[in-house]
Amino acid sequence: MQDQGTKDFCYSEVASIKKDSSICDKIRGALEKNKCYLSIALTKQDLSICDKIQDGTLKDECYRNVAVSKQDLSICDKIQDHLEKDKCFMYIAFTKGDLSICDKASGGASKDMCYLEAAQTKHDSFICDKIQDQQMKESCYINTK
């Protein structure tokens, strides 16, 4: 008799190879099932598969990765965790080179970090002016020279 962990692993591997999330449905272990959905959703960049994930942290990770891959800000809004949502906005802001996206971040620290990263990436000290935290602003000016 096979143990359930071995079966779950087998289903997960087959689902990954076939890129078929319906195979994940056969997995009994909650964590393994959620990871299976995550893997398929990221491979296929399919938001509807993210919706099947029961674990909030993994679901948010799935939404963030699909949003960044598709460069779709509206997907970031589905993320429940504020830090993950801010990361989503930040990654898309960098990729698109659109600083106005940093303004969507919820907290001042997240916005400042977004501006800092953008300034350093673009080697543009004028972006540092948007940073509220004085220490981070000074660091920004130093690192963009």
Image: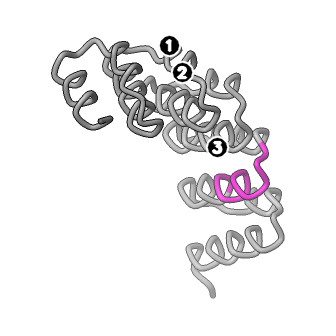
Q: Residues within 10 Å of mark 2 (few under 14, many from 20)?
A: some
Q: Give the residue at x 72% y 51%.
A: 41
- Residue at coordinates 64% horizontally, 39% vertically from top-left? 68
> Which of the 4 image quarters holds residue 3?
bottom right
In front of the other: 51 or 6: 51
Mark 2 to mark 3 CA distance (whole Å): 31 Å
Is 45 a magenta residue? Answer: yes
Drawn side of residue 136 relative to residue 114, left or right: left
Q: Which residue is mark 2?
A: 99
Q: Of tags 2 and 1, which is closer to the observer?
A: 2
Q: Type of residue at label 2?
A: Leu
Q: Does dot 3 land on a helix, a strand or a loop?
A: loop
Look at the image and say whether residue 145 sits in the magenta stretch: no
Q: Residue at x 68, y 62 (%)?
A: 27
Q: Quadrant location of the N terminus?
A: bottom right
Residue 90 or 122: which is nearer the viewer? Answer: 122
Please identify the residue farthest to the front as the structure is shown.
Answer: 145
Pointer 3 residue: 53
